[in-house]
Image (cartoon, rainbow, N blue to C red):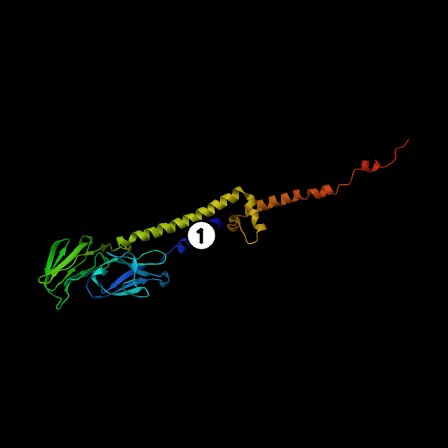
Amino acid sequence: MKETSVLCLLFLISLLSCTTNQARLTVSPSSSQFFEGDFVSLSCEEDDSSAGWTLRRNTSKQQRTQCGDGWGKPAGSSCTITIMIHDSGVYWCESREGPISNMVNLTVTGGSVILQSPVLPVMEGDDVTLLCKTKTTPSNLPAAFYKDGSLIRKQPTGHMTIQHVSRSDEGLYKCDISGHGESPSSWITVTDKHTTTPPPTSTSPAVLSVLSCVGSVCVVVLLVLLVRRYVHKNPEVANFSSMCPGFSTPDAALGNTGNAQAVRTEAISYGEIAITPKRIRDIKPEPDVIYSLLPVQQ
């Protein structure tokens, strides 16, 4: 019972030691498309600031550069940008330990029309509103909305609401305002209502983190079992603790009193054998040795 308790404790400690905090990247204003010169704020929303989250990005010219390294103005785990066309790319939060947050794809256009759509995945069953916006006022002009290249509908006020979205609504959207132009395309992701996992672009690091954690637990348990097996086959190792204060064998830690008693019994038996030379030194010379010194009678 004690052995099982210790192994369970080691298992729980290993799990706690490899638990990592997760962050969620948010964008304000909430959109995946921006006009050149717009002010954008990105923030790593985290449970524990000690994880040291840093905002990074991939663009067509740079890979894995962090906020403040030639772009953006960092402020803790947030970053503000006066965004330009060359800032289009994929953004994410990354911690010192390695895990990353969800990824967002930001598109910056030099044109006059953008489609404001959710930058984060939307949950199945929710309502989603798309806004076709011009750089100049007014922005509520009639617009046509497209999904995967096909016309969905035309709206007189420039915005369209998709009610109770489902997985079939997932796809590539864009809009067009007559006389102003067409927006870039943006992908809208729909997640299952009962699913709490990150979007597909960020699940791989999370899975790797879990697999690494499980691997660490297995290594700890395997090492404990191997050491115990070695001590069982070599009982003299258990007596090492008496020669080295502060050292305890796995058997002693697990409360294996039966084996410990057997080792102590062998040590005592060996001690009794070791003192037998004292009895040899106490033996007196035989009398015939003394008699040999007497003169011989005629």
Secondary structure under tag 1 reads: helix
Quarter of the rendering containing residue 175: bottom left
Task: Looking at this view, name the residue that lies furthest to the right.
Answer: 298
User: What residue lies at 40% left-to-right and 50% top-to-bottom?
Assistant: 216
Crowding at mark 1 (Cα within 10 Å: few <14, some 14-19, many 20+): some
Q: Which residue is mark 1?
A: 10
Residue at image location 82% in from the left, 38% down from the top: 290
Question: Horizontal and vertical percent for residue 212?
Answer: 37, 50
Residue 260 in picture, x, y percent from top left: 56, 47
77 on left or right of 252: left
Q: Position of residue 84 (x, y in %)?
A: 21, 63
Task: Name the one closer to the observer, 196 or 141.
Answer: 141
The tally of labels here is 1
Q: Residue 225, position in %: x, y?
A: 47, 46
From the viewer's side, name the closer residue of 29 and 153: 29
| 118 relative to 214 in the view: left or right | left
Q: Is residue 116 above or below residue 238?
A: below
The residue furthest top is: 298
Where, quadrant-wise, is the C terminus in this rendering?
top right
Q: Residue at x 32, y 53 (%)?
A: 205
Q: Nearer the viewer, residue 87 or 30?
A: 87
The residue furthest bottom is 137
Q: Please tell me in which quadrant of the rendered image residue 141 appears.
A: bottom left
**Placement of 72 over or under 229, stated as above or below:** below
Q: Disc 1 residue type?
A: Leu
